[in-house]
Image: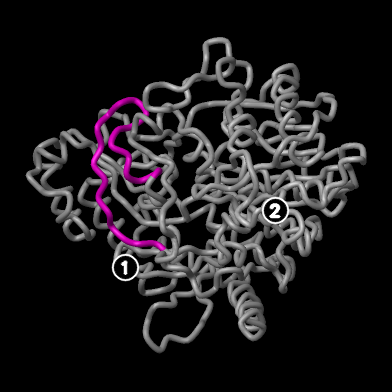
Amino acid sequence: MKGKKLIHILTSLCLSTAILASCGQSESSVPEKESSESISENGETSAGENEEGQNQAEGIDWDEDPAEVNWYMWAAGVSAPGQDAIDRIEEKVNEITLKEINVHVNLSILEMGTYLTQMPMQITAGDKIDLITTFPAGSGTFSNMVSSGQLLPLGDYLDSCCGDMLEVVPDNFFDATTVKGEIYAAPIYTDYTNDLYFIGKKDIFEETGFNAEDVDSYEELEKVFEKVKELHPELKIVSSGAQTITGSVGVTLNNEKYDTLTDIAVVFYEKEGQETKVVNLYETDEYKREVGIYRDWYEKGYVDQDIMMREDDPTDDPTVFGGFLQGNKARTQNKVSPQGTELVSLKMAEGPVVTSSVAIMTMAIPVNATEPEAAARVMNLAYTNADLKNLVSYGIEGEDYTLNEDNGVVITENCTYAPNTNTIFGNVFLGHLTEGEALAGVTRDIPDQSTLAYSPFLGFTVDLEPISNEVAQLSSIIEEYGKQVRCGMADEDTYQEMIDKMYASGLETYLTEIQRQLDEWLENQ
């Protein structure tokens, strides 16, 4: 998935949660070692021994000086906090890490733009960075960092230092971060359900007389659109802040599933007897039907005329009925918006779990880490220790936030630390709900993800280096035409013009190389 699309996803993620930020370093003495902790059913740690009756600190030499781990991540809010704020949090973090694993953490949390440009460059320069969260776009993505040789294979560190994490994170999630037989990162543990919903204003939907459980296809949804247009001709029926109508990844409105190898190259894989063929998404019959639906909605006046330009979340816009959203329950089934608008969620399709969705954010150890074993132990805590998770995500309870009656995080008036990092590292289920999530009825219940539709190509990542010239040319064409196509504004001639330009810019070479890589990957499975 290209950087721009990933940034849209990240922006949506940030808009749906509270604004926070961070960065820092501090010194702390090693406290006397107390009893270790064990993992409960929800992945949270509690005092005592682990399930096998073994001390969790086994393998750590408590007579040695604490290892120093430089831990980098970014603030998912508007800006990163000041150094004083980070120093406060880092001191509390080290009270945990020094006691539990004899590691002193130096925490650095940067603004998103700074992190994207600075972190990969620092690793290339050989700076001491021991633990990172890969970024959803640009040079900081998991795939780019692996192909650039910037990440350390986790290998034996998983068994020797991350056994608790392995008990929490399902085995098949690691398929998405495995390259040529080596695991290079730990995916964040979250709900990877990827279903497509239409989210609309409840009061307007109820006026139409339809029942939510009966609207489960785009044909039925069109009937709703038609009725809303009749009742409220002044409304924009469908809008979006991501310059696309559905923004779906891996599934069409007809529930046809495909693996997004890139934002151009895909493989449809559910048809009986269908060969594993890499194709241009924009030339497939399935996607052409999808675009035809967009175009029909646009011509009928259902689509917001400003959809190509707006970047805000239209959920609370009183001039908009609704829009599409893809993801898990926490994203797609909210009962109210962050501003309190009552919503209805209509399920349109069940999307697959693909490599790009699982590997979009991971925890990894750079190749130049000087304390990889200690970094792996810190990473293990991020998936198992709720106190550490919430400290790094929200700060100190009572100083930076309080919990309301719904157990949602309420940022205090004088808060100086608010990086909003819960959803970008470790075990998301250990983190408190934001105030908006609690208001929307979100829970931290761990779902059964064993029944999800996993792509048969989970773990395959395209190496774009051999086709970098074609990537650059094709990306510029998608930038030129993509929004028009995805928003229903491209007529047939414009659509064909885009495809012709793609062929003139090396599309065949591009697809052939990706097919070669996929065939090679399949042979080694």
- Could you tell me the amino acid type at mark 2? Gln
Residue 288 location (% of width, % of height): 36, 68
Residue 142 location (% of width, % of height): 68, 56
Which segment did they paint magenta?
330-351
Q: Quadrant of residue 320?
A: top left
Residue 5 location (% of width, % of height): 53, 50
Q: Earlier in the sequence, mark 2 or mark 1?
A: 2
Q: Is residue 64 above or below residue 171?
A: above
Residue at screen point 25% across, 37% down: 343
Residue 517 location (% of width, % of height): 66, 78
Task: Between residue 484 and residue 190, name the one nearer to us.
Answer: 190
Q: To which residue does mark 1 refer? A: 289
Left or right: where 37 falls relative to 286:
right
Left or right: where 337 falls relative to 263:
left
- Say if mark 2 contacts mark 1, CB within 8 Å: no
Q: Is residue 223 magenta?
A: no
Q: To which residue does mark 2 refer? A: 54
Q: Is residue 352 above or below residue 246?
A: below
Q: Is residue 299 above or below residue 147?
A: above
